[in-house]
Image (cartoon, grey):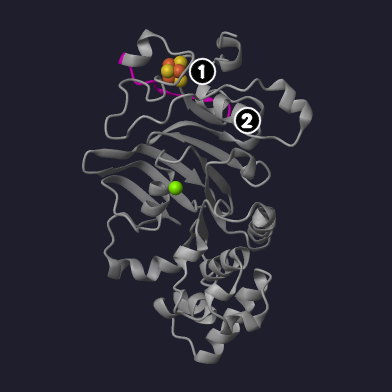
Amino acid sequence: MTNALEIEDLVMHFGPVRAVDAVSLTIPRGGVTALVGESGSGKSTVGRCVVRLLKPTSGSVRIGGVDVTHLTRRQLRPHRSTVSIVFQDPAGSLDPRMLVGDVVAEPLRLSSARMSRAERQKRVAESLGQVGLRAEVARRYPHELSGGQRQRVSIARALISKPSLLIADEPISALDVSVQASVLNLLADLQRDIGFACLFITHNLSAVEYLADEIAVMYLGQLMEKGTRSQIFSSPAHPYTQALLAAAPVADPVRQRARTPVLLGDDLPSALDPPSGCRFRTRCPLAFDKCATDVPPHVKIGNGEAACHLVQADGTRPDVRAGVPE
Ligand code: SF4
Ligand code: MG
């Protein structure tokens, strides 16, 4: 069976800025992969390359087995409905002059499928219903809705064309904390019921703890670690993943105690001039000579892989907590 998404050696440079460098990632049909990293790590750029808002510098993106990397706008048209994106800020991504019903119907109008007005309205009402909004909302303007309702409208628009892949780029980060959980639960329920594959982009590891099958951790344009959710949460191999987990708030007080916070300290270095060797080395508490000269290979461990000189194929892994002096 073909995969929902196959990204191979994806590179996206903006002039001298190396936003994404050789990222490879596969999502099976109906699978959920979280792409996690701090802001500036290049994860949104990956998402934008997948929906072809950006044309990659090199590498390839296949959606449902179709290579969309080099398709023109026109050639892309029949494939448009197979992938949708939900952005972080629903206020910015919804046209304020359009009625909600027209916003939600837009992908149907842009697709090549012919559809009557009545059929479109029916699909809009269905789509709004799926995200927990009443059909009357179609006759309102986005600004008349709350932030949470607006994000539900973006989700309805993204799903109306029945995509096999949804890119969710920080879909709850701009929302009030009070509604974040309900929108996250909505996405999780829709994913389970409809079965679309999802690339869930987030800086917040705890947001994906109950949603993702697999987790990919990105740092300065490169993947540091990939693995199943349980592998990443229970035995993270890469020092950066370990640091991210230590910094993430967890609900479980027992696990909270077991985690000594590891401060990531300085800001992310610039993607304009990323560190030589391992890109994480300027913030890694375990960095040693080789880290500055040699790019760490991706070592397979369990069902995943990690790129760190201290990770061995036999499962030996570094431990940031043990390595940081008091
Ligand atoms: Fe740290 Fe070196 Fe491993 Fe990079 S390769 S994560 S700098 S120990
Ligand atoms: Mg982003």
Q: Residue 315: tell me if it is visible.
A: no
Q: CA distance from mark 2 to mark 1?
A: 15 Å
Query: Which amino acid type is marked by label 1?
Result: Ala
163 shown above or below 176: below
Place residue 136 in its image quadrant: bottom right
Tell me which segment is drawn in magenta: 293-302
**What residue did someone put label 2 on?**
231
Within 10 Å of disc 2 (Cα), the crowding (few <14, some 14-19, many 20+) is some
Q: Earlier in the sequence, mark 2 or mark 1?
A: 2
Q: Which mark is residue 14?
A: none
- Residue occupying image coordinates x 52% and y 61%: 164
Residue 79: image location, x then y, percent: 40, 66
Whether residue 294 appears in magenta in the rendering, the answer is: yes
Query: In the figure, is residue 55 to the left or right of 113?
Result: left
Helix, strand or loop at mark 2: helix
229 shown above or below 160: above
- Of 85 and 321, the residue lying toward us: 321
**What residue did someone put label 1 on?**
313
